[in-house]
Amino acid sequence: MRVALIQMAPSADRSANILQAQRLVSEAVKAEKPDLVVLPEIWSCLGGAVAIKQASAELLPAPGDTGGVLYEALRAMAREHNIWVHGGSIGELCGPDTGGKLANTSLVFNPRGEECGRYRKIHLFDVVTPNGDGYRESDNYVPGETIEVVDIDDVPTGLAICYDLRFAELFLALRAANVEMIILPAAFTQQTGEAHWDILVRARAIEAQAWVIACGTTGWHVDGQGNQRQTYGHSMIVSPWGEVVLQLGSEEGWGVADLDMDEVRQVRQRMPVQANRRLI
């Protein structure tokens, strides 16, 4: 499978972000003809006040029905280019029972533009980083409740988002579901990215014995309090043996790698970790 990572530098301007995503996807498809493209976390609206986040989010339709601007933009990418599209994540309107909060939701479309997977981020980023910056994702988002596995071109694929990367139990649950590939869109902060991004992505690939596709945002944006925030970029693809086969830098752009799914079977046969597991 040939996979393209679409590393974006999004802002709070949804229309500009859609144009940026369309341009980068078109460039990658024209140059390298990938089977699958992957966008980063919350690329549709990064930063901005609560009202902007709300206005940039949308209700998601039942599969097969017509959706909003973002939903249809992702569907159109899949159809136009005849590719699988993992739509990173977008803000999902969840209704009045959540107090007006959103979900941070990934969508997967097949080359016919049919929705094949939907995942809500389980672990919300409520932390203070070592430099004192505070983040409270739960102020604006509700957590998901369930893992999601989707077949992408006959490859069982687990879905996760950003902060989920720090929770090994999620990845072990996906391994127990026998996934061969895990896709993780992200918007890692510059500080946490420098410290932990490479280590965590490689660790999850090694312990799950699966391909891990981790696609991040990059660049600067302004949060709802007017603070300048920087995300890390360095999107990467790691093999089931923990080898980094593709890594981008800190610039907006894209990169492509070929994934050999036989490597999953080979690694698992040589080192049957799942069969040897004693603790749950």
Image (cartoon, rainbow, N blue to C red):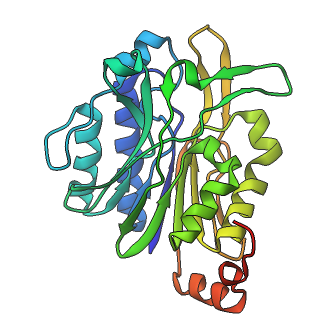
* Residue 133 in view (yes/no): yes
| Residue most extreme to the front | 279
Give the residue displayed 27% in from the left and 30% down from the top.
Answer: 59
Give the residue displayed 73% in from the left and 34% down from the top.
Answer: 190
Give the residue displayed 71% in from the left and 80% down from the top.
Answer: 273
Image quarter hosting the N terminus: bottom left
On screen, 133 above or below 202?
Answer: above
Give the image location of residue 96, x and y in percent: 32, 17
On screen, 18 above or below 108?
Answer: above
Q: Quadrant of residue 172?
A: bottom right
Q: Nearer the viewer, residue 211 or 172?
A: 172
Image quarter hosting the C terminus: bottom right
Q: Nearer the viewer, residue 148 or 197?
A: 148
Give the image location of residue 264, x and y in percent: 58, 81
Question: Residue 129 vs residue 36: left or right?
Answer: right
| Residue most extreme to the left | 65
Q: How many marks on residues? A: 0
Give the image location of residue 241, x and y in percent: 71, 77
* Residue 35 in view (yes/no): no
